[in-house]
Amino acid sequence: AACTQQLLCCEGDGLLCSEGLWVRADRVWLHYTAPHNSERAWGFKLRATPVGWRARSQAAALALPHASPLDLLSLLAERRPAELLRPSVLANLLRYLRSGGAPCKERVCHVLLRVLPHATLRDVDFDWARFGSLEAIVEWHEELYERQRVPPLLPAGSQAMLDLLVDLRERLRAEGLPLWEAALPYLDEIAELSSLSKWLLLPPGSGAEPPP
């Protein structure tokens, strides 16, 4: 393919290492020139990161070389968060989190944590108390670590589940929705502390009421 459009030309120190360029294309060519570098005393460094993608059809989407299906969840959380709040999707995500051998559970929790703050939970036809079943997983790891007498640092997946449970109960309480009976004795205390911490971090004059 021929290079027919020049996007940027930099000379010397014209481009700082902290600057970035967003190219709306699927292919980019770079042409380096260094006439006074015969001894190769210095060089160039480039870092490229994909911003997003758009498939022309469902067949094209299935053919894309995704490193992980969880990348699709991240894109949905960014572009179509309402799709992740469909009852069937929530049920499948919860089933994934409850599966013993499922990898990268923390990524699923982080996706849900990105979506929940922008949703009205009372408008979602889903029994949020079903997420309370994740408490048993967190509690199991806590008991295991206590028996082994190791520092109480939960695995990444269980820690992310705990963060999700705290955030979810905090949101339910804020909307006046009923809470499930917590199995972890400290869960409500963490949720209250989280709400208070977020309120204290608000800028002065925001007008937000303190948590009850």
Image (cartoon, grey):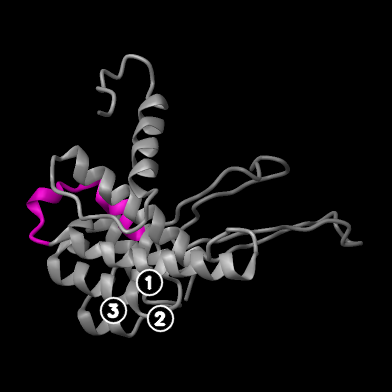
- First to last magenta residue range: 111-126
> What numbered label is drawn on residue 165?
none
> What numbered label is drawn on residue 100?
2
Whole-percent x, y for residue 89 in the image: 19, 70
Mark 1 vs mark 2, CA separation in Å: 17 Å
Location of the C terminus (image quadrant): top left
Tag 2: residue type? Gly
123 inside magenta stretch: yes
Image point (59%, 49%), residue name: 9
Whole-percent x, y for residue 127 in the image: 13, 61
- Above or below — where is 154 with respect to 194? below
Residue 148: name its quadrant: bottom right
Mark 1 lies on residue:
70
103 inside magenta stretch: no
The mark lying in front, picked from 3 and 1, is: 1
Is residue 26 among the parts visible in the rendering?
no
